Amino acid sequence: MKTMTAWATADENREMDLVIYCFGNETLKDAWGCVKDWGTLISNVQPPEEKKPANCTAKDVKNFFFIMEPNGGQLAKITELVLQGN
């Protein structure tokens, strides 16, 4: 199986302006290889900077970490809107 970095770097048109990382394993380090220069890497798993590879060549990548908490009331409202076609 290819890594995300191998897939992205096989064709320069595959690098992304924005990568949103939501997995819970070592692939956060690999996600750095998918971001274009001056792109953005967002994670809700851990701060991306903690997994930035020493050999990362992307320039000036902004990276952000945030924490989410499930909210049953909000999810119910979203479900209702989707079912209504909104």
Image (spheres, rainbow, N blue to C red):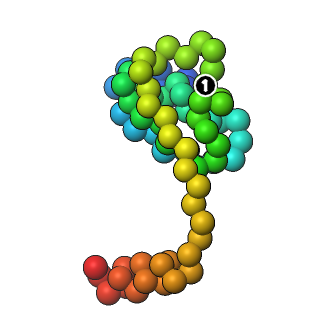
Asked whether residue 3 is in view, the answer is no
Residue drawn at point x = 55 percent, y = 50 percent: 66
| Residue 49 vertical placement versus 25 (above, below) | above
- Which quarter shows the C terminus? bottom left
Percent of width and height locating residue 40: 42, 34
Percent of width and height locating residue 76: 49, 84
Residue drawn at point x = 63 percent, y = 15 percent: 54
Q: Is residue 86 left or right of residue 35?
A: left
Residue drawn at point x = 32 percent, y = 87 percent: 84
In the current view of this chain or complex, which residue is farthest to the left? 86
Percent of width and height locating residue 19: 46, 39
Q: Is residue 47 left or right of residue 9?
A: right
Q: Is residue 26 left or right of residue 82?
A: right
Percent of width and height locating residue 70: 59, 70
Q: Residues within 10 Å of mark 1 (few under 14, many from 20)?
A: some
Q: Dot 1 corresponds to which residue?
A: 52
Q: Which amino acid does label 1 sit on?
A: Lys
